[in-house]
Image (cartoon, rainbow, N blue to C red):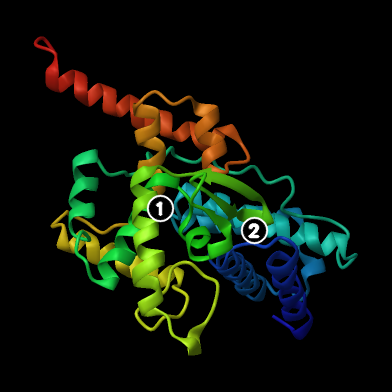
Amino acid sequence: MDLFGKTCLHSFIEYIQIEKNYSEYTIQYYQEDIEHLFLFMNEQNLHSLKDVEYFDARLYLTQLFEKEYSRATLARKISSLRSFYKFLMREQIVDDNPFALLSQPKKHLRVPKFFYEEEMEKLFDVCSGTSEIDQRNKALLEILYATGIRVSECANITLKDIDLDFDTILVKGKGRKERIVIFGSFANEALKTYINESRQRLMNKAHDHPYLFVNYRGTPITVRGIRHILNTMIEKAALTGKMHPHMLRHTFATHLLNNGADLRTVQELLGHANLSSTQVYTHVTKEHLRKTYLSHHPRA
């Protein structure tokens, strides 16, 4: 791609990073999807973003189908390119959006993976020690399970965001949206122990900062650091498979619904803009009911 195309991509990345406040992973996917389009343009001798027409967009989608990408990946790529060209139109760089009329393939419904309650107990057992790291890990696990917040939201919690008297945390979510999440007595106790004892010992004057969770050096913990901590926990708990950080968010939602919470409340607690994002968990609970029935009904 020529220098002009690279400049357009750079401007778009700045736009979704600064104005849209997208996560680093979302930005990475957008960049990869647009760079993939650039490769296609080179193959088709399309020298400018203005040269791409609806016919080219259809051909590009056909090639993606032939390469047997999943429906979810196809839908994401189309969405990325549609947003990119919408931005180019806003900036008056192009006149039309060749991806606007492409129909997105319907996604297969993927039922979220979650932990059963007895599995959660095993995870809590592995961080029940009294060391600074154990107390930090327990507070981290309690908060993720008690609130269902995203790992990126957890990494950004500061001390002033927490109200231990009312058991609430002010969370900064996607698109700079703020919401209040609630936690219970177990998380409250773990937080108090961690903040008053372990965090102070892990911190030092050279690393003074307001962030709640810190690593062994006293610096703010990262999303990658949280993922490493959780995977270490699952290994120690001898649970099969690897833990994706989002599994605790899925577990939070699933356990609430299994115990009678209504969908709208769970939607608000998760910070979902649309109810459809939350409804996927109803399939989890139905599967749970089905398995329970088959396991316990005498004539199942």
Q: In terms of image quadrants, where is residue 82? A: bottom right
Residue 273 appears anywhere in the view: yes
**Horizontal side, residue 245 vs residue 106: left or right:** left
Question: Are discs 2 and 1 less than 8 Å apart at CB?
Answer: no
Residue 264 point in image, percent of width and height: 55, 28
**Horizontal side, residue 87 vs residue 135: left or right:** right
On screen, residue 255 above or below 77: above
- The residue beneath circle 2 is 80
On screen, residue 261 above or below 185: above
Residue 192 point in image, percent of width and height: 39, 58
Residue drawn at 41 percent across, 38 percent down: 253
Q: Image quadrant for the N terminus? A: bottom right
Give whichever of 266, 138 is nearer the camera. 138
Residue 116 point in image, percent of width and height: 24, 40
Q: Image quadrant for the C terminus? A: top left
Give whichever of 206, 295 is nearer the camera. 206
- Tell me the kind of residue under disc 2: Ser
Give the class, few, some or many, for how many residues have Cα within 10 Å of label 2's Cα (few <14, many ≥20): many
The numbered mark, 2 or 1, whose residue comes first in the sequence reads: 2
**Horizontal side, residue 79 vs residue 245: left or right:** right
Identify the secondary structure beneath mark 2: helix
Residue 247 appears anywhere in the view: no
Determine the residue located farthest toward the bottom in the rendered image.
206
Give the class, few, some or many, for how many residues have Cα within 10 Å of label 1's Cα (few <14, many ≥20): many
- The residue beneath circle 1 is 143
Residue drawn at 72 percent across, 57 percent down: 83
**Horizontal side, residue 33 vs residue 212: left or right:** right
Give whichever of 162, 252 is nearer the camera. 162
Residue 180 point in image, percent of width and height: 58, 45
In 3D space, how far apart are the residues under numbered discs 2 and 1 (Cα atoms)? Answer: 33 Å
